[in-house]
Amino acid sequence: MNNRMDLPSFRGGFSLESRELNVSLFKFPEDGAPNTVVVRIVNYSEHTGNGQLTCPDTIVSAFETDLLEQPLRESKYRDNLLTCVLSPYEIKTYRVTLKV
């Protein structure tokens, strides 16, 4: 049995609040971890971008990753909100596991 949720309905519960930041990728991780998504966020502006990614459920863990989805550092989160801070023109990839 596949314990992943359907991506379109799972994605529907996410939103990014920011003037400068944009979501450029949203997918399941390559390792198939359950209740986990990979989100790539881009700052296209010349200013530092601050934002919050709202998730449909409580975050259990969140890490900034490299492009191969290997953890680099733990990310700041609380309840269902992931805090995102990106320098001008920076790209960050996050791996977020939810309590579903």
Image (tube, rainbow, N blue to C red):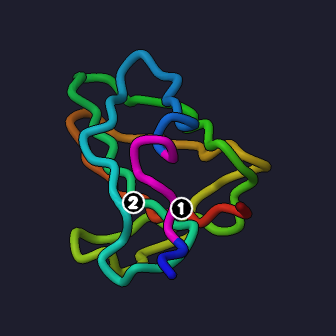
Residue pointed to by mark 2: 38
Q: Decide: is 86 above or below 20.
A: below
Q: Which mark is residue 96?
A: 1
Q: In the rendering, at what x and y percent does residue 12 appear?
A: 50, 34
Residue in the picture at 23% in, 23% down: 46
* In-front residue for pair 5/92: 5
Q: In the rendering, at what x and y percent does residue 37 appear?
A: 45, 60
Badge 2 local density, few (<14 within 10 Å), some, or many (20+)? many
Q: Hey, which residue is sitting farthest front in the picture?
A: 1
Residue 41 as seen in the image, left or right of residue 55: left
Residue 32 as seen in the image, left or right of residue 84: left
Residue in the picture at 21% in, 27% down: 44
Q: In the rendering, at what x and y percent does residue 83 appear?
A: 59, 43
> Where is the C terminus found, in terms of image quarters?
bottom right
Q: Hey, which residue is sitting farthest right in the picture?
A: 79
Provide the secondary structure element on which disc 1 rests: strand
Residue in the picture at 40% in, 79% down: 32
Residue type at tag 1: Val
Provide the secondary structure element on which disc 2 rests: strand
Q: Decide: is 29 above or below 33.
A: above
Gap in angstroms between the C-alphas marked 1 and 2: 6 Å
